[in-house]
Amino acid sequence: MMGQRIRLLALTLAAASVLLVATLTASADERAEREALETLLWVASVDGGLDQEIHAYFWSQLRKVVGGDPDSLDALARYLGEGQEANVAFQRAVWESVQRSNEAGAVVRTPGLERATEALIAQFGEAVVGDALASTESLLRGAAFGEVVRGGSGSVGYIDTDSIARVVSGLDATGDRLAKLLDRDWDGALSEQIILPGLVRVLTPTRFVVERMEDTPGHERTEGFTADRRGWGVEEGFSIIRYEAGVAFDGRAGMREGCRGMFSMVGAGCETIPMPMRGHEGVRASTSFSEAGQSFGIAFQAIWLVESRAVVMAFVIDEGGVADAQAKLTALLTRTRFD
């Protein structure tokens, strides 16, 4: 939920920030430079997001950075695009090493990381990627020994097994967001993403991050999954509960409990109303809540797929209020197929 998860910057994406920093040393507008870099880092973070508004804002800041010169903007666009392959390879290699370092309790640098580092240096030069490599070293030591992790952006924190798992599960979505952000022409085309094979698929402009939820005591024969994606001021996603054959599962109670659990995370109560959908039993709910002085609307729809032995819950949180959240939930469900 928005504001509930740790916003761990994917420090290996210092490589992505390097793409920008390397071109901004003679910026015509320091504020625009800062805004562009902060936008890039947020899009690249584990809980980042992307939509057309963010894309337009990012490129408007880059235009200010180059003083509106079209040739300089063209050169910057090419530079950012050309760096994506090296960046994505570096990102994946670092997080593989982070996982192994965490498991081993010692710093582990895989052969893939060594190759990706060499490619990054070859692409940008050692002087440019120095901060990225230092951030990576801090990340590896944090994973292995529990040390404080320090990023090139000034971020400071700790890393643990859960945060590592979340970053790794979102690597595909992060790469997809960055590729779209760094392409000057916004690509809002919808592509199909399978959220859970044989159960839920959705048409989406950017990928959802899909995670398996931890087992709940007393519910060993059920499994849960979450999927979410973000833009500025909006988050949409799914929570799915699937249970084994033979399990006595009350789907009606499951839908109500799911709503109460989700709304309680934002300090709100949930009152559901019956709302069947596509021949399945369902409930819907919506309300408003405040967080850090900002008002939001949340809209929720749950569906009990009896034959699939699952309850699927879709939600939208929007800073525009309840009406906007409800409208975007309807749009999300229109793009969603239940197999």
Image (cartoon, rainbow, N blue to C red):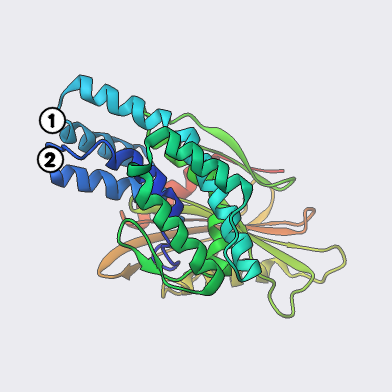
Relative to residue 234, is residue 296 depicted above or below? below
Residue 239 visible somewhere in the drawing = no
Mark sitting earlier along the chain (2/1): 2
Of helix, strand and loop, which one carries label 2?
Answer: loop
Q: Horizontal and vertical percent for residue 73?
A: 24, 26
Residue under the image location 56 percent in, 59 percent down: 98
Query: In this image, 73 relative to 221: left or right?
Result: left
Q: Position of residue 269 (x, y in %)?
A: 45, 74
Q: Are marks 2 and 1 in contact (CB under 8 Å)?
A: yes
Q: Please indicate whether residue 265 sits to the left or right of residue 297 in the image.
A: right
Give the residue pinned by disc 2: 29
Q: Nearer the viewer, residue 293 or 11?
A: 11
Q: Is 185 placed above or below 11 here?
A: above
Residue at the image position 32 percent from the left and 42 percent from the top: 54
Residue lying furthest right: 246
Q: Amino acid at mark 2?
A: Asp
Residue placed under numbered mark 1 in the picture: 67
The image position of residue 215, as x and y in percent, is: 69, 72
